[in-house]
């Protein structure tokens, strides 16, 4: 029975092209548009996907600088400077100690060996730049690109989380300050707590019966409106109580 087979050259073409296709998927997932701004991905031989790797870096990170060299033993080395300006934004949102911890973590992530072949990636971070060295000429580039994009994704996630936490604290500060400005008292709540829980504690502070479940269904704007309404009632009761005491005092003075 006749059998079909692939020669080594065809296998290398398929492996390299598959590696390139994965990199295009990574570009797409990172926000690039390889469909309307296509990248040629077919590789005629192993190693041609390197150019696609550098194109993918430029698409995701912006303009990268690459320096290639080869020693007397024909060992290839690529040194790449990759801009990551989002790092400066992260540094502004964390303490210097936290920044050092994150840099150490990211530099550890920059160390990556190809699982199947000889290629190896190492690097370090300086300011808002990744300095990466790729040694070896035979390897799967998509695994290296995936690792670099993972660093970028974590930086973006940390920035979003830090901003969310800052906004969360500010909202709680506004709730607590509103109470202090209106009543001159401070509710027993932490700015780190969920805003619905903070408002629930304020309700208890104001001796106002409003369930936590009902508060959780409110938007922050509605929370502010509810708080103003409650404080209006508290102030109104306070005024009525003062007037009643004044009336009692006045009646006592008349009897005398």
Image (cartoon, helix red, strand yellow):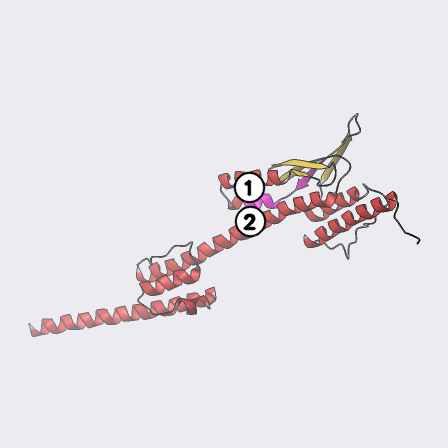
Give the number of callouts.
Answer: 2
Per the image, the residue denoted by label 2 is: 158
Q: Quadrant of residue 223?
A: bottom left
Asked whether residue 81 is drawn in magenta, I would say yes
Per the image, the residue denoted by label 1 is: 102
Asked whether residue 207 is drawn in magenta, I would say no
In the picture, measured across the screen, residue 208 lies left or right of residue 172, that is left
Q: Position of residue 1 (x, y in %)?
A: 93, 54
Q: Position of residue 171 (x, y in %)?
A: 44, 58
Query: Quadrant where the C terminus lies?
Result: bottom left
Range of the magenta residues? 79-90
Image: 3 above or below 104: below
In the picture, measured across the screen, residue 200 lies left or right of residue 18, that is left
Residue at x 46%, y 68% (from the top left corner) = 217
Q: Residue furthest top?
A: 72
Q: Position of residue 193 (x, y in %)?
A: 42, 56
Image: 29 above or below 137: below
Residue 142 in view here: yes
Residue 31 in view here: no
């Amino acid at each position: 029975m006749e059998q079909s087979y692939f020669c080594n050259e065809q296998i290398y073409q398929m492996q390299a092209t598959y590696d390139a296709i994965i990199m295009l998927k990574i570009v797409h997932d990172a926000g690039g548009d390889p469909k309307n701004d296509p990248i040629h991905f077919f590789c005629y031989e192993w190693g041609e996907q390197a150019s696609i790797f550098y194109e993918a870096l430029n698409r995701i990170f912006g303009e990268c600088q690459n320096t290639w060299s080869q020693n007397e033993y024909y060992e290839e080395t690529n040194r790449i400077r990759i801009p990551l300006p989002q790092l400066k934004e992260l540094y502004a949102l964390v303490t210097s100690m936290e920044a050092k911890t994150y840099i150490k973590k990211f530099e550890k992530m920059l160390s990556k060996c190809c699982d199947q072949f000889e290629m190896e990636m190492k690097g370090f971070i300086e300011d808002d730049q990744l300095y990466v060295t790729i040694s070896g000429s035979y390897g799967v580039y998509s695994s290296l690109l995936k690792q670099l994009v993972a660093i970028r994704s974590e930086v973006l996630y940390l920035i979003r989380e830090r901003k969310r936490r800052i906004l969360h604290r500010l909202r709680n500060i506004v709730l607590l300050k509103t109470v202090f400005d209106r009543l001159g008292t401070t509710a027993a709540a932490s700015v780190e707590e969920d805003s619905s829980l903070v408002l629930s504690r304020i309700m208890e502070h104001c001796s106002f019966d409003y369930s936590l479940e009902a508060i959780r269904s409110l938007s922050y704007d509605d929370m502010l409106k509810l708080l103003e309404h409650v404080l209006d009632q508290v102030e109104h009761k306070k005024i009525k109580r003062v007037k009643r005491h004044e009336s009692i005092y006045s009646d006592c003075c008349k009897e005398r």
